[in-house]
Amino acid sequence: MTELATYNFAYLDEQTKRMIRRAILKAIAIPGYQVPFASREMPMPYGWGTGGVQVTASIIGPEDVLKVIDQGADDTTNAVSIRAFFQKVANVAVTTHTKDATIIQTRHRIPEQQLEKGQVLVYQVPIPEPLRFLEPRETETRKMHALEEYGLMHVKLYEDIARHGRISTTYAYPVKVAGRYVMDPSPTPKFDNPKMHMSEALQLFGAGREKRIYAVPPYTDVVSLDFEDYPFEIQKFEQPCALCGAQGVYLDEVVLDDKGGRMFVCSDTDHCEDRREHGHAGEMLAPAKEAAE
Amino acid sequence: MYVAVKGGEAAINNAHRLLADRRRGDRSLPSVTIEQIVEQLGLAVDRVMAEASLYDRTLAALAVRQSRGDLIEAIFLLRAYRTTLPRFGTSVPVDTAGMTVERRVSATYKDLPGGQLLGPTFDYTHRLLDPSLLSDEPIEEPARKSASGEHVMRVSDILAHEGLIEADGEFPEDNEAGDLTREPLEFPMGRDLRLQALARGDEGFLLALGYSTQRGYGRNHPFVGEVRIGEVEVELEVAELGFAISLGRIRVTECQMVNQFKGSSKAPPQFTRGYGLVFGQSERKAMSMSLVDRALRAEELGEDVTAPAQDEEFVISHSDNVQATGFVEHLKLPHYVDFQAELALVRKMRADIEKTRRDGNHNPDQEAAE
């Protein structure tokens, strides 16, 4: 039987890591520009975070502390799986606490707690091209970026307003980075867009299947596209988190029964747990606590 | 009361344990061996090797077994292994004219040097289920004849003598073939990279695209110049030695499709070619590949690009089944954060419409004003 491979630290070989680091450096140098890179075939499926995993694998060191979230939660299956992958191939420390992590790999959310200098947020990106659904051809969209020709995107947003009375993009809401490139923030809800602006943390975006890496360096302008008379707005929830009582955070709707009963809880599980540990309680938690006492 | 979803890790472990159980199936039956898969499911093994771009029967068979016979999953397993292997160098182009052919058919000539050789083909079998295969009955040894030693010249070489077919084309001396798996994909591609992508492309996808060209979506008047299956030598030039040494032999299927071409302002009328080369025995794949290769040359040959099979970006971006299956199946991952955003939007839009309707009923003046 052929002898199977043993794997390098963090799975990727050092040559590959160097290649990816070069792409990352270029991406940081040109904020919002999509740098093509020779994405490798990873031992997890395309579309399941191969881009983010390659970026993380290329920047992680033995001293790093890794946090992985999906939908804001540390315990969603794919987050568990990716965390376990890095524990296995890099044997790094992992955490669920946002503030303790040096690298946070995410799918679809930015943590509620403000990120700090020195932290790196790695986004998993399915379709890196913000213009893709307006123009399916890569050869065309690259030209549009080169010429800074973003009229099509504004027409799309305008048509939304004409048809629906508002911009009907709720996630993967396009942003302009450092006044130059229009960028897809990955399918995070637009609620998270303001967190990207002037962030102290380095933000890296990896799209494995589409073979693109892009970046937002710390302290960079990230502006959500809008119109003077229809300014960008984020989602607002009418009630606080039912578990920790947090307001102004992104909530998940949890269906409780088949009679229309539902509750809203923090999508960021770490944020929610942290608040509860500090004595905050939402309406669903308080009675249970009382009953127990 | 809502209980936070914990224990994703235990759930994953248990799922994998159950998967292993289902893969093994009834323990009272003997486990299928790697050798059995290699010997008796050889075409499945070939497909996995071809679309994983890794020629290793044992590992491909292991992947087939591990994936419970799901070939795309097996291809994925083998590719994820391949990606970790070091690259020693680039082989010398294989010489398919020097192939030890086991099968060779041409549709363009009744007879030709080297002859027509049917080989191990399903063609002309009557597709009747064979009850004798329900049990393991002895199988006759195949009829053999000694090699004639006759040079099995390629049909393209026959046509080339008269200048009736386009030549192979020349690469500059220092040309290095691209590597799809080591460089980012960019359009438009060179034909070397395009053929690489097609060689590892999904058989079903290429079959459908090839078929579409026959039905008029980018018709290119194909004739099977020849299809040949057999073993070729793989050689590597070693710098220290100054000559090529043999690494071994691999079985490949090659298809040379001969296509009509009316000529253009630049080139006189002559036949053009579509090319297919696949690991192992897979005529369907090699023929589909050559149809699609020819279709994708439309622009190069000054033809109108009107059909999906002629559209390089469309074809190459969607031909990889490991990419496709990953992205299609990722839809089952949680998307509830984005769905929540959409829910809120739809609710708000419905509320707005409801409000407008109500206001409209109570306040006819406003309507009149508009």
Image: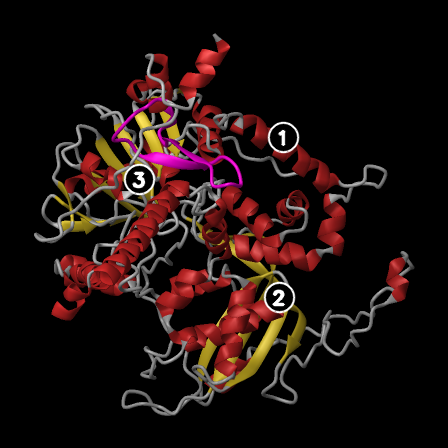
Question: Residue at (23%, 26%) from the top-left corner?
Answer: A115
Instruction: Residue type at mark 1: give it.
Output: Asn
The front one of B349 and B216 is B349
Residue A272 left/right relative to B36: left
Report the disc number at residue B14.
1
Residue A168 against residue B129 in the figure, above or below: above
**Labels 2 and 1 in the same subunit:** yes
Q: Chain of mark 3?
A: A
Percent position (x, y) of residue B312? 37, 69
Residue A189 against residue A289 in the figure, above or below: below
Q: Chain of mark 2?
A: B
Residue A8 against residue B211 in the figure, above or below: above
Question: Residue at (50%, 43%) from the top-left corner?
Answer: B80
Alpha-carbon distance for marks 3 and 1? 35 Å
In the structure shown, which secondary structural element does the residue marked by tag 1 occupy? helix
Q: Is residue A166 at all visible to an observer of this figure?
A: yes
Extent of the magenta region: A244-270
Alpha-carbon distance for marks 2 and 3? 36 Å
Give the crowd class for mark 3: few <14, some 14-19, many >=20 residues within 10 Å: many
Residue B114 left/right relative to A291: right
Question: Residue at (51%, 75%) from the top-left corner?
Answer: B210
Residue A18 left/right relative to B2: left
In the structure shown, which secondary structural element does the residue marked by tag 3 occupy? helix
Instruction: Residue type at mark 2: give it.
Output: Ser
The front one of B357 and B56 is B357
Q: Which residue is mark 3?
A: A20
Percent position (x, y) of residue B12? 57, 32
**Labels 2 and 3 in the same subunit:** no
